[in-house]
Image: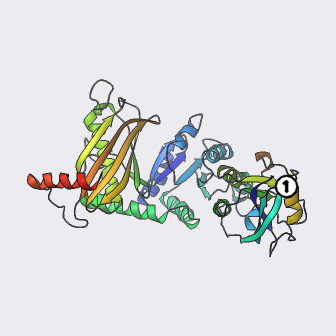
Amino acid sequence: MNEARVAIPSTYPGGLDAEVEAHFGHCGVYTLVDIKEGKIAKVSTLPSIPHQQGGCLAPVNHLAQNGVTALIAGGMGMRPLMGFNQVGIDVFRGTENPSVRLAVEALINGELQPFSRDHTCGGGQEHHH
Amino acid sequence: MIVAIITDRREPLAALEEGFARKGYRSEFLAPGPHLRQHLQAHPWNLVVLDSSSAPCRDVAEQVLEVDARLNMAVITDMDAQTFHETGEGFGFLGTLPTSPGVLDAERILTKLKAIGGVDPAIEKAQAHLDAMGRQHHPRCVVCWGQHPSGLKVDYRVTGANTVEGRFGCGRSFEGYENVIHGGVVSSLLDGAMANCMLARGVEAYTIDLQVRYKTAVEVGVPATIRGEWLRAAGPFHLLQATLEQDGKVRARARAKFFEGTPNRPSQPMPSGAGMRQLMIQARKRLV
């Protein structure tokens, strides 16, 4: 991947050394990494937003409005996945990497798999794994 | 504001429909099956209700999300909470409705919809304007009044900041030439959509110029969707447009100029003679 703004659900306070958070919709913070010419160009953080039952498109809109084009996640439901796809955010599986830095490097190196419908799990009524 | 109810049983859901209507929502009943996607694409729904006694809710929900993942969904089901949680996992359902839902169930699910920001306050306000203005200014309208003995009975609903939408069954009693809806009726439907756009803005207004383009025949027996849109205003003059579609194809379109009356007061008398000519000159000058 050469050009992207990648969101990684992270443990607080975020940043390249933070851990990747499995709960994408209820993470402490998103680390945003701008990739240019296949390298990390800029790192920033974005607070997550609360949402309730039935409101799982809120994180989708939140990330889309902040210019995110790719997301690294461990698990998510069918609805947010289709929401991300429809707003043009590519979703990749990648929580086995212990830190945001390693997850992003794996993405740059093309080692992360696209998140498909077969990978969707629950999140159910209240949370996203 | 429009709710899609995906079901093959309408009668047991009459109270739910009534509950939605009391809150300003029109319900449309869609049958599950191969044409569902096409029907879902046809309207800007505010809420989709899936009846799990008609089709498995996960299958239908997947079709809904494929059309638009932003659509909020509720499920009619008799599942207990735990079973529903497992069944609906990942679909982000708003909640459940009982298999024989009542008026209050509609209100309850709409409250949830509002709580997640699923109702645009501007649209809700416009709908309230439309309902109140309709009652006050044209309670026996031949196009809109649902109890009119021989009227068109189109229930226009607000769909956006400047748009409304209505449905018309195109019954044979409105036929002109054989199997074709009368052009005057088509014109009335388009004009009615635009008039409802004005009412949704809280403005009583008269049509002073209407241009209708009949593209192809409006067929008898094929339900039509009529959409109106307010475009802009210059002083008391408003420019609007409308379309009438059947099977997703525009059969007729119109543009019109409206002149403001006096909102919340007795209707303003229409000008006549020289006054009307002056109005038309001004409208042409100010709304190009």
Q: Secondary structure at mark 1?
A: helix
Q: Residues within 10 Å of mark 1 (few under 14, many from 20)?
A: some
Residue appearing at x 11%, y 56% in the figure: B275
Q: Nearer the viewer, residue B252 or B99?
A: B252
Residue appearing at x 89%, y 62% in the figure: A102
- Left or right placement of residue B81 versus residue B114 in this view: right
Q: Chain of mark 1?
A: A
Color scheme of the displayed model: rainbow
Which residue is farthest top?
B178
Report x, y in % for residue B164: 40, 52
Residue appearing at x 29%, y 39% in the figure: B212
Question: Is residue B24 in view from this perspective?
Answer: yes
Report x, y in % for residue B229: 38, 51
- Left or right placement of residue A36 versus residue B106 in this view: right
Quarter in which the C terminus of chain A is drawn: bottom right
Q: Nearer the viewer, residue A42 or B189?
A: A42
Residue at mark 1: A108
Which residue is farthest front?
A37
Question: Is residue B100 in view from this perspective?
Answer: no
Q: Nearer the viewer, residue B19 or B193?
A: B193
Report x, y in % for residue A117: 76, 46
Which residue is farthest left?
B273
Q: Which image quarter: residue B188? A: top left
Identity of the amino acid at label 1? Answer: Ile
Report x, y in % for residue B108: 54, 63
